[in-house]
Amino acid sequence: MEYSKLVAVSGLPGLFELLNSKTDGAILRSLDDKTTRFVSTRVHNFSHLESIEIYTVRDNVNLVDIFNAMETSTEKLPDDKNADAVKKYFEKVYPDMDFDRVYASDMKKMVKWFAVLKKNNVEIKLTELPEEEEEVVEEVPAEKPAKKAVAKKKEPVAKKEADSDIAEAPAKKPAKKTTPKKKAE
């Protein structure tokens, strides 16, 4: 199971694996009880875990950074029902978090989600986009292209004279189409 395919759904508890998307919803599998079901986008909103960011006192960080800090921490996960214990846990694990803007309910969700990810052995990492190879383009000053020498064919004298007569005749311009003006009665 890939971290990039995991979503949180508004109004539904837990995390889900995105199996297939449709125009009016998605087919999801719950990580808790492994049930598969269709969820409509008319009723629910989907949030990919990769796109969730957390407020900090500096720049916002991705949820993966918080989960990695939780994984490397020696602190025991707190009970997700105790808001004070959860806040104290994050003050030790990730002290840069902006506790004025991150709600206690969000911190509780992070603890629950982390436990679910660990239970399902999900590797917590962002998908890396393939790096585009940068082409080194040397700037060359624009020069006028050299004219190619074209060898002219020798034409018979008689044909040459006939062509010159045609070339000297003035070309006719197509006649302009005019619409007749109606006389005022």
Image: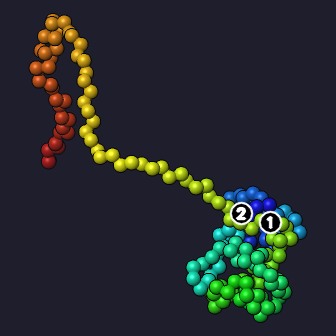
Residue at 76 percent of width and 76 percent of height = 72
Q: Examine the rendered structure and indicate whether residue 99 appears above or below residue 5.
A: below
Q: Earlier in the sequence, mark 1 or mark 2?
A: 2
Q: Give coordinates of residue 165: x percent, y percent.
A: 12, 15
How many C-alpha atoms fall within 10 Å of the one at disc 2: few (<14), some, or many (≥20)? some
How many C-alpha atoms fall within 10 Å of the one at disc 1: few (<14), some, or many (≥20)? some
Q: Which residue is mark 2?
A: 4
Residue at 67 percent of width and 61 percent of height = 127
Q: Left or right: where does residue 98 sit relative to residue 134?
A: right
Q: Give coordinates of residue 58: x percent, y percent.
A: 57, 82
Q: Give coordinates of residue 82: x percent, y percent.
A: 81, 91
Which of 75/127 is in front? 75
Q: Quadrant of residue 151?
A: top left
Mark 1 to mark 2 CA distance (whole Å): 10 Å
Q: Is residue 28 visible?
A: no
Q: Quadrant of residue 39?
A: bottom right
Q: Left or right: where does residue 143 sit relative to residue 62?
A: left
Amino acid found under the numbered disc labelled 1: Val
Which of 183/83 is in front? 83
Amino acid found under the numbered disc labelled 2: Ser
Q: Secondary structure at mark 1?
A: loop
Q: Quadrant of the N terminus?
A: bottom right
Q: Which residue is mark 1?
A: 122
Q: Give coordinates of residue 112: x percent, y percent.
A: 80, 79
